[in-house]
Image (cartoon, rainbow, N blue to C red):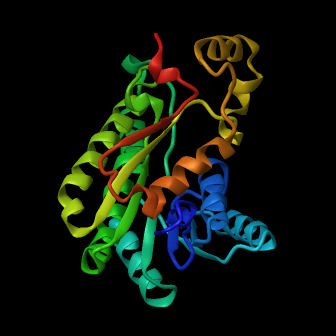
Amino acid sequence: MKAVLESFNLAGRTALVTGSSAGIGLALARGLAGAGAQLVLNARNVDKLQQAAEALRAEGATVHVAAFDVTDKAAVTQAIEKIEREIGPIGILVNNAGMQRRAPLEDFDEAEWHTLMKTNVDSVFFVGQAVARHMIGRKRGKIINICSVQSELGRPNIAPYTASKGAVKMLTKGMAIDWGQHGIQVNGLGPGYFKTELTQALVDNQEFSGWLIGRTPSRRWGDVEDLVGAAVFLASDASNFVNGHILYVDGGVTATL
């Protein structure tokens, strides 16, 4: 019988993580490497990508970099073909690239709306489709789309972001329905509020932090390492009959009013 822990082993698999030069994306990449995966880091900033890759290599990871714009369909298609040809078959895709913009909805700029939707939704479609076309032929693959507690819950001044993450949740379910028959599992990972470079101002805001900690059953901010176990689970054989599910790692925020 296969040992339970062996089902979490990612050795021999190549994982592409978009938006992985820092923050949650980098933490997820590090976790997948720790479970044995070969990494392909993606972002647009080549210098930041190389710095992240060097840091992971120093920890013993096998790392490649692929700098391309996930909102550019032609660039995505070309990059995925190159990865498949020169690095190896992509067995795990983490669609992590995303952005946030805050403003009262009545004042939200139209151009900002389209930029946010391209980054948060179009990229998941473009990269997911390009990778899945290869996975379909192999009858195997894992796709993890990074959702958010805002896939379920709203907050003031982020309605477009909430709309985008709701769309990612439903696109995840649609991908699972269409591609499950080909041996592909597509699931979402929904982070709550995590300490990252992008949220440091909120962490330092005593009023907001006090409200959040009081609102969170676990009574703390999340650390990016808290996401790793869930990501490895969704990327591994341990989740072979989990499809179309959104796994919230949020300290219980979505469970309480």
Q: How many marks?
A: 0
Q: Residue at x 45, y 54 (%)?
A: 234
Residue 192 appears at what percent x and percent y? 55, 31
- Direction right: furthest residue: 58
Query: Residue 194 vs residue 140: left or right?
Result: right
Query: Residue 141 vs residue 223: left or right?
Result: left
Q: Is residue 167 above or below residue 12?
A: above
Residue 181 in view of the camera: yes
Q: Residue at x 43, y 63 (%)?
A: 237
Q: Is residue 175 above or below residue 188?
A: below
* Nearer the observer, 247 or 51: 247
Question: Which picture quadrant has residue 204?
Answer: top right
Q: Residue at x 59, y 45 (%)?
A: 227
* Nearer the observer, 235 or 114: 235
Q: Is residue 182 above or below residue 257?
A: below
Question: Which picture quadrant has residue 39?
Answer: bottom right
Residue 219 appears at what percent x and percent y? 67, 19
* Nearer the observer, 57 or 109: 57
Q: Is residue 215 above or below residue 244?
A: above
Q: Residue at x 71, y 10 (%)?
A: 207
- Direction bottom: furthest residue: 86
Residue 94 in view of the camera: no
Residue 142 appears at what percent x and percent y? 39, 63
Residue 119 appears at what percent x and percent y? 43, 49
